Image: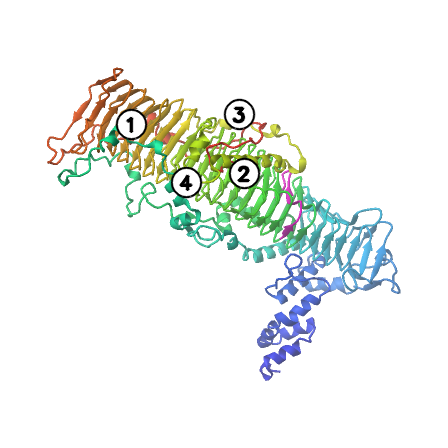
Amino acid sequence: MEVGSLPVELWRVILAYLPLPDLGRCCQVCRAWRELILSLDNTRWRQLCLRCPECRHPNWPSQPHLEPPSWREALKQHALATRTWTQNGPELQSSACLLFFRRRKDRRTWHVGPGCEFETLRGALGVVGPYDRVVLHPGVYEEQAEVALKVPVELVGLGRLGEVALLVCMEQQCPTARLCNLVFMPPWFSTVVYKTSWGHVQLDNCNFEGAQLQVRGPGTCQARFCSFSQGSSAHLLGVVLSLLDSCDFSGSDTASVTVEGPPVSERNWACKHLAALARTFQSCGASGSNSSPPTGHVAGSTGGHQPPGANVKKEHVNIEDWQKRTGVDAVCQGTVIEDCWSDHSEGEEEDGGGINTINPCTLDYKIPCDHHGLSHLLKPRPDGSLPPASSLDPPSVTPEPLTFQQELDRDPEAQMLAASTHGCILRRCLFREGKGGVHLSNYGQARLEGNVFRGLNYAVRCIQNSTIVMLRNEVCECRASGVFLRLSAQGLIAENDIHSNGEAGLDIRKGANPIIVCNKIHSGLRSGVVVLGNGKGSIRSNQIYNNKEAGVYILFSGNPVVSGNHIFQGQAAGIAINENGRGMISENVIRENQWGGVDIRRGGDPILRNNYICYGYSDGVVVGERGRGLIEGNHVYCNKGCGVWVMSSSLPQLLGNYITHNCMYGLAVFCRKDPGNIEAREGNWPGQDGGGDGGSGERRGVEGEGREGQENLNEEGELFAWESDLDSEDERHSARRSISVALVESNCMNYNGAVGLYVKSSEPLNVFSNLVNSNRGTGITVLQSSQLTRLVTNCIVDNGRGGVTVEKDCRVELRGNGIYKNGGHGVSFGGNGQIVENDVVGNCGYGIQVSGSADIKILRNRVQPAQGCGIAVLGPVKGVVHDNLLFQGHPGNKKTLLHMDPANESCALRNNSVLRHNNSCTPAPPWVLENPPPRPLASSPSGLSSSQYPSRLGISMTTRISATVESGCHSGSMFCSIL
């Protein structure tokens, strides 16, 4: 009969009455009939699939509301899976069909129940033959002793699920068995209702109520559409391979699934069939990976930001939109400089500063100084673009996280783990409302794919050298940590959605070393990822956002690699390294966090390299009390507080960072013990209610709550002896460049809202070879420095106020710096120290002004002021002014180039040279700075070359732990402490 003889709609009505075998025969008639049968997917095939008593909705239990891609394909996969148990036996290569017929020619069906052949299950099992089918009629079947399955058999419950209940304990002593449509409840003498130690058992559409399933290797298990409730669980001991597919676990008293022990070397016949089923699911699941986070979570992102999951390689940033949203521009206008920071002396203001008109015939009096040792950082690139140090706009692009496939391509170990199919495989299961989800111990292995964990104490616990592979799972609403790894656990955790957990999303400790890539870790009530107690791990290309505490928290000798992540919109710090934490933190994008982008304190000693730390609501990087670390090559920009905030009791190394466009200071070094810090900081934020004291009090309150809630550091009340696992102090520092003074070297600090470098410290500080330019305030301000601060070979240019300001009683050495074209005095010095071999040219105020009772040496400097004095010694200054070369600036400047108060008898002026213009109406002579050329010179300070800095510093563990989280907050930084 031709298909075209009737309308297609009528054919579909007719074919809807055919049973499954007849539909299969119709598919074989011709191509037109096959296409017609396949078009019944949402009608007849859907009915056949849902009416099958041996299976449930294809997306049960986690997503029963979603339609499968194909109902026919779902029914086909179910039919193939239900026959796995019959595929054992010897391989007959001559004719596979003979094996098929040999198994089934004598197969019988036995009925058990009232009025049937057998009244009891034990009686029927005593007479069944191999592969017979035992049909249990509705009722409750109870056995008072253990029942043994000695031949392959199929037990099927008749009617709807729940009408046939077994109160038995079965031990399988045969190669294979299948149980379907049954409810298992524990008998009075055992909680284990089914156990096998070498055969294969297949469970389809069964319920376990308060019972335990036990599989011991080389035995295997395949469970599909089963429900484990009322404290039921599955225990797998030394299994080579078992598959739990589309099962529901709820109400567990312990872990719902326990995998213990390494896979045994012996394998049974079912392993190759289960491996084939597992590989089929991997190929289907890989195409549906969810690599992009929900855009709803980034709705509050700044105007120019791309959604974090957008399939682009660069993220564009719009600075103007961000300023409008956050009010940064208004804050900057009010926080540039305090009145007391004026760079002009009272005498200069009284006589008007000297110059109100400019004669056009004398515009070339300025000495050229653009070819100094750091000029390459300011000049346009060959392609015409501007380098970060001279760009008026912050970086407009940030790197996107790598995709999962890109991570696999570059990491052979992750690739091997992603392809592995060993141990227990759980896929598309639902774990809910119980104590635990999956527990691995003692070298156990498991693969979790496409599961949902919800409302548990914990989702996954992997300990004692076990290996876990977690792909595309959802872990949410756990009361403790979502995923917990310790005691040298390892594995691959990728493309999971981990959110809304009561403690950390992932908790790594005690030598655990997992690979964590391409996950979404968000909306947690504590931190996103916690690494502590000698934990390691590689945390790469994740989206970590909107967590109440730090996105990544490293403490108690945690030592992970954190690379290529986007960590944003957190309610505390982006990354916190505390209590002797370490780690390699590189190439992350850390943005829009409420507290410090990166917070290092109390012995924290990480390597922080090549990160983008931006658009934070507080400081970019915070190095608090006893913080250490190498901070190198980072872009720190557009933060509402400081770019980098350093406490003077810390010992960091800041090398080659770009610290730009921050609302307050570029780099601030504070002394915690100074009670004036709060007032000084508060003075920079006029018009804000609550000021510094209010903010500090609020932070102390928050930290107090944090101390009371430190139970996340010790899992469920357990106390660990950390000391036995930690390395010695000697090993810790063996691979690090040793320094005894905080080092700030080769950084660019520009376009910040206040001072470029602000120092109020009680410890020594070395500041070498930095470019400090175009800041709204002074280039470098030293307000307090009881120990020596060395400013050597820096370039300080085009700042809105003075170049360098040093207040009374400070100890400062200025050597080999280039101080050019600043809006106030080149150097305003009121402390003790030396000003040696600097070039101070083109500044709007005095070249060098020394005042107060300073004890100072001013030697071999080259000075040309635009207006005002070249060198002015005001007040009872002690010291010497020797061998300086002074050039006249504007020809209309009537002030003396070298001025000292007549009453000063304690300061000696010797061998200073003064060069003036011959005629103010003629062009100035072509003065140039040569022998040496304009400072800073190209060579590194103190004989240190850049080659002496190791390109990759090793990471080792820290010392034993005895400290607790500190009380209170440092008074200088703005909302930047970490719990």
Q: Find the distance from the CA under tag 3 to the CA under tag 2.
A: 22 Å
Q: Residues within 10 Å of mark 2 (few under 14, many from 20)?
A: many
Looking at the image, is mark 3 or mark 4 nearer the viewer? 4
Q: Residues within 10 Å of mark 1 (few under 14, many from 20)?
A: many
Mark 3 — residue? 729
Mark 1 — residue? 816
| Residue 624 horizontal/vertical position (percent) | 48, 31
Nearest to N terminus: mark 3 or mark 2: 2
**Would residue 798 be seen by someone viewing this image from the given angle?**
yes
The amino acid type found where label 4 is placed reads Val
Q: Are marks 2 and 1 in contact (CB under 8 Å)?
A: no
Residue toward you, 268 or 728: 728
On the picture, is 34 further left or further right than 411?
right
| Residue 547 horizontal/vertical position (percent) | 55, 45
Q: Quadrant of the C terminus?
A: top right
Residue that lies at the very extreme toward the bottom in this rendered image: 5
Where 406 sits versus 66, above or below? Answer: above
| Residue 380 horizontal/vertical position (percent) | 28, 44
Q: Are marks 3 and 4 in contact (CB under 8 Å)?
A: no
Nearest to N terminus: mark 4 or mark 2: 2
The amino acid type found where label 2 is placed reads Tyr
Q: Which residues are magenta?
A: 451-467
| Residue 587 horizontal/vertical position (percent) | 45, 42
Q: Find the distance from the CA under tag 2 to the CA under tag 1.
A: 41 Å
Residue that lies at the very extreme toward the top in this rendered image: 905
Q: Residues within 10 Å of mark 4 (few under 14, many from 20)?
A: many
Mark 2 — residue? 553
Nearest to N terminus: mark 3 or mark 4: 4
Mark 4 — residue? 636
Nearest to N terminus: mark 1 or mark 3: 3
